Image (spheres, grey):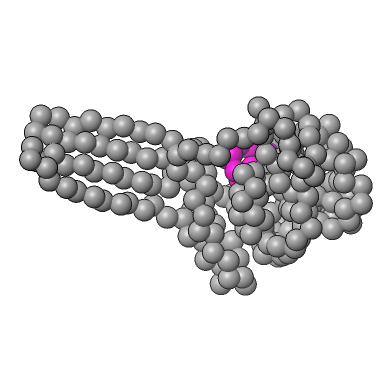
Amino acid sequence: MLTIWITLTLYLSIGYAANRDVRLKVNCSTLLNKKLFHLHSNLWNVSKSSEVYLKESVFLTTFETRCSNERCLTRTSMAKHVPVPKVCPKGWKSRKGSCYQVFSEKVNWFQAQMNCRKHDSTLVQIEDELENQWLKKQYPDIKMATWIDAVDLGKEEQWMWFSSGKTAAYLPWFSGEPNNHNSIEHCAVIFNNGNEKWNDTKCHYSFYFMCEKKIY
């Protein structure tokens, strides 16, 4: 059974000083794009044949409220991230402000997402034909299907980039795809049999994965 943990965690700390100030700090896992809420809520129904726990919080916002007898003040701040380097890490391919890397470890789509996060990146979001063809030229020897960020987990045939919540406008599908075989193919791959055209497949299958990180 596939279990996806999407959590909202509250940490409540109340202390009383001489002036009876109350300090309330709330840390919560949040989504930067409202579209992701609908997408995440449907992850519960993805697959029932794998035991994967998606526990990592990708985005974090801190809300800090301080209350006294007169008023309450709230301060909101984004979590600090490791600064993105100006150049691509060793072994990564560079193109127009992005770095790309294919990892040959075979994992399912959910594990691929978490593995990319460990490299301060996401699964690749391919936005036009030039980018798609460039990737094919950079990785001519990859014949194994390779996970990308596109999914239609939220609603059938509405393909989105999972990490940004944006609609996937460019979709160079292989002939006859996406076919949603057996009604359980909701994640996209590239390089299936060495072809740069895309295919939809079961999210719990194990394939290579490609990560992308932005540099500015």
Compared with 56, 170 (above or below) is above
- Asked if residue 78 lies left or right of residue 138, the reply is left
Image point (31%, 45%), residue name: 26
Where is residue 1? Give x, y as percent.
56, 72
Image point (35%, 33%), residue name: 76
Q: Is residue 167 magenta?
A: yes
Compared with 114, 25 (above or below) is above
Question: Which quarter of the picture shows residue 124?
Answer: top right
Where is residue 199? Give x, y as percent.
79, 52
**Residue numbers of the magenta segment:** 161-168
Residue 68 in sight:
yes
Where is residue 41? Give x, y as percent.
49, 53
Residue 38 in sight:
no
- The quarter of the rendered structure image containing the C terminus is top right
Secondary structure mostly taken by the magenta-highlighted segment of the chain: loop
Q: Is residue 110 magenta?
A: no
Image point (36%, 53%), residue name: 9
Front one among 143 and 179: 143
- Asked if residue 28 lies left or right of residue 115, the reply is left
Image point (52%, 47%), residue name: 58
Where is residue 7? Give x, y as percent.
42, 55
Compared with 178, 3 (above or below) is below
- Asked if residue 33 lies left or right of residue 132, the reply is left
